[in-house]
Amino acid sequence: MVKKSSQQRDLFESERSFRLLVEGVADYALYMLDPKGIITSWNIGGERIKGYTPEEILGQHFSRFYTETDRANGKPARALGIARDKGRYEEEGWRVRKDGTFFWASVVIDPIYEDGEVIGFAKITRDITERRNTQLKLEAMQKQLAESQKFDALGQLTGGVAHDFNNLLMIISGSLHIVKKSVDDDTRLQRAISAIETATKRGAALTNQLLTFARRQSVNPQVIDFSERITAIREVLDAGVGSSVRLAFDIDRKVWPLKTDVSELETALLNLVINARDAMPDGGTVTIRARNVALDEAHLAGEFVAIDIADTGLGIPADVVDKIFEPFFTTKPIGKGTGLGLSQVHGFAHQAGGTVKVASELGKGTTFTILLPRAEGTPAREPTGGPAFHGSGTVLLVEDNPDVALVSIGLLEQLGYQVRRVADAEAALREIETNGVDFVFSDIVMPGKMDGLSLAHHLRQIRPGLPILLATGYSDVAAHVRGDFPILRKPYEIHELSEAIAKLPR
């Protein structure tokens, strides 16, 4: 009798300890259901997570924790059925607290047996909303990283192709100028030359868009007044939209100055205006707005000028909007677009230290917003123009490509210079030490230990008064020039070469 009493006491203590353990767990809702799903026990974790006291929830059906949609679809009964048939039910999904708020739950339901019969269910619920949010953020970051890596890979490909193509265009463009000087008035020949010239300029524009997307375009940033630039290119923009589309402007009079590459900004605006026009086949309005904004975002903080290009067109489908900045992606018919316009806008905005965003609604239109950093300083004034510069003296041309060098020599000689050409930086230093020159005109990308930029910095130290002009089809190192040396973009024409030489400090 004593032995039986001791066993009962031990069993009672064991059950009491287990009950205290279950009831005291605060991070898990641990409770029992009868075979029909009525709640028969409740712990402090259930009260903390779901908001019900034991008096409020005991005797109620557990389906009240489910959303209305899940209840209408019979999900609670299905969960118990799976637990009974399979021996366990596990899932993650939305559940509802007493106050009506939602949380993301991890749920486990186990059947409880006695003599082979199901007498109820043990249910465990955890609130994993924070973990889910962290996982979603991680997945978003991984997706962003994958997109960034894809864009970098595309950038390397497009940058390399465009660099080589720019050298070819330089040869074609320069040779055309020489041919034009030597041909007679044969009308057919002149027309052929004009056609080649137009095609060359088009090719140069395409490579420029590729390089800007690849962020390998050497930029010439200057402080500008956006209102003045819009006024200066208004005719070009008007021509871009055509007669069936109205162009409207809403420029804040107090908009801050920008420091950016004027040519790239104008190209980006024209690309967006033309895209807006194409999105309005039946006509409409394109509105260009500019306003000051202060941002405090994770990846973009500071003072910016926001430039909106808004149309009243068809809008962009949701399955397309994530692809629009990819190079060569286009929804236009063959022959109506290269798919490079928006990639140029993307590359330009990020290269300038800003970004580009898009908001679109089908049937109501699209707004592209370019965000560019505010600049300190006074906006640059447009040059007043004047006669073409004609010089004299000796120029040292540093160019490793013999075909490009031949064209450059021809252009420099037409401007009145004597030209000595070397193929690399080491030879340039020897030539300057031996003979001396009036100025140096060097490509940036060259074989050998020193590239053109390193050569320029070295000459600045040993020949501080020697004028230096750099040229490039593209170069990663050009981004580090930061205004230290003037850069001429390939392919350049004789008037651009002339202007660049005229601006060199003497």
Image: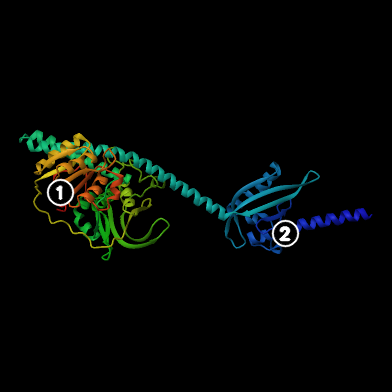
Q: Quadrant of residue 10?
A: bottom right
- Nearer to me, 350 or 506: 506
Q: Secondary structure under badge 2?
A: helix
Badge 1 crowding class, 10 Å Cα cut-off, few under 14, some 14 to 19, many 20 or more, is many
Q: Seen from this angle, which residue lies furthest front?
A: 434
Residue 469 drawn at (x, y percent): 19, 47
User: Which numbered disc flags the more N-terminal residue, 1 or 2?
Assistant: 2
- Relative depth, front residue between 424 and 125: 424
Q: Is residue 94 visible?
A: yes
Residue tagged 1: 501
Most foreground residue, 100 or 170:
170
Cα–Cα gap, marks 1 and 2? 85 Å
Q: Do tag 1 and tag 2 residues touch (Cβ < 8 Å)? A: no
The mark closer to the camera, 1 or 2, is 1
How far across and down, in percent of the image, does residue 156 sit?
Answer: 34, 40
Relative to 253, residue 308 above or below: above
Disc tally is 2
Farthest residue, direction left: 185
User: Label 2 sits on what residue type?
Assistant: Glu
Residue 352 in the image: x percent, y percent?
Answer: 31, 53
Which of the image's four quarters has the N terminus? bottom right
Can the viewer see residue 41? no
Residue at label 2?
Answer: 23
Q: Horizontal and vertical percent for residue 308? A: 31, 56
Looking at numbered disc 1 in the image, what kind of residue is underneath it? Ile
| Residue 3 shown left or right of residue 286 in the figure | right
